[in-house]
Amino acid sequence: MSEMKILYYPHEILTTPAQAVGNVDDEIRKLLDDMAETMYLNKGLGLAGNQVGLLKRLVCIDIPEDEEQGIKATGLLQMVNPRIVESEGEVEFQEGCLSFPGLYIDVPRAAKVTFEYLDRNGKLQTVHADGLLSVAVQHEIDHTNGVVFIDRLTPKARKRALRDYERAKRKLGIN
Ligand SMILES: [Zn+2]
């Protein structure tokens, strides 16, 4: 496995919709494994293909258990062509994003979602999720559509988030 380079906003690939994957083959499995390694090395809970320069609809998520917050571990989810098929309710979580280092914002999302994806063997899986997994999968599927989390804010909150991001980048020494 090898680590991939994470793209930072405003890289144009982050705002470009990705293509559906036609065939789940060894090449796709290798990309999913490299993405998982990259996510772990950067201490992310999720990573989408766009974030490592791949315009393919690929997503990895691994949410660790947090007993205090009542969050169950998901284990590693490696998804091809994930999509939301149902959503309900509203929730706001504080989200971070590996493509926006140093920025943490409250983002409005659906509280519960049902999503589908092809697993690494090309088998269709359906998952009902709430809590952090629901939020994470919405965040990552947005990436595959070229949508980033600040796009979910009101225009005013988005402007503020961009200012905070510029400040965070300067602090971290990122251009
Ligand atoms: Zn993200």
Image: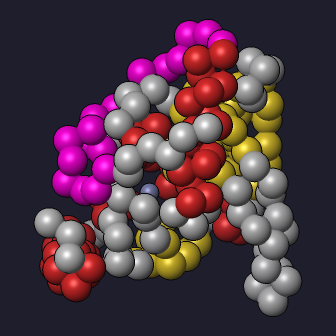
Magenta-drawn segment: 7-25
Q: Is residue 156 visible?
A: no
Q: Position of residue 61 (x, y in %)?
A: 65, 51
Q: In this orientation, which residue lies closer to the viewer: 3 or 134? A: 3
Residue 8 magenta-highlighted: yes
- Color style of the picture: secondary structure
Side of 65 where 51 appears, left or right: left
Spot occupied by residue 74 in the image (x, y as percentages of width and height): 80, 57
Is 113 placed above or below 131 here? above
Q: Which residue sits furthest bottom?
A: 68
From what the image shows, is residue 128 above or below residue 1?
Answer: below
Q: Going by the picture, which residue comes out furthest to the front?
A: 2
Is 28 on the left-hand or right-hand side of 133?
A: left
Which secondary structure class fits the magenta region best?
loop
Outermost residue on the top side: it is 23
Q: Residue at x 61, y 10 (%)?
A: 23
Q: Quadrant of the C terminus?
A: bottom left
Up/down of 156 relative to 57, above or below = below
Q: Is residue 28 visible?
A: yes
Q: Is residue 2 magenta?
A: no
- Residue 14: give x, y in percent of width and height: 30, 44
Residue sitting at x 45%, y 43%: 4
Instruction: Please report the residue visible at 61 percent of the width from the left and 58 percent of the height from the top.
Output: 40
Rendered residue at 40%/78% (across/down): 105
Give the side of residue 165 with respect to residue 53, left or right: left
> Ligand 1 lies in which image quarter?
bottom left
Residue 151 appears at what percent x and percent y?
30, 58
Residue 165 lies in what quarter of the image?
Answer: bottom left
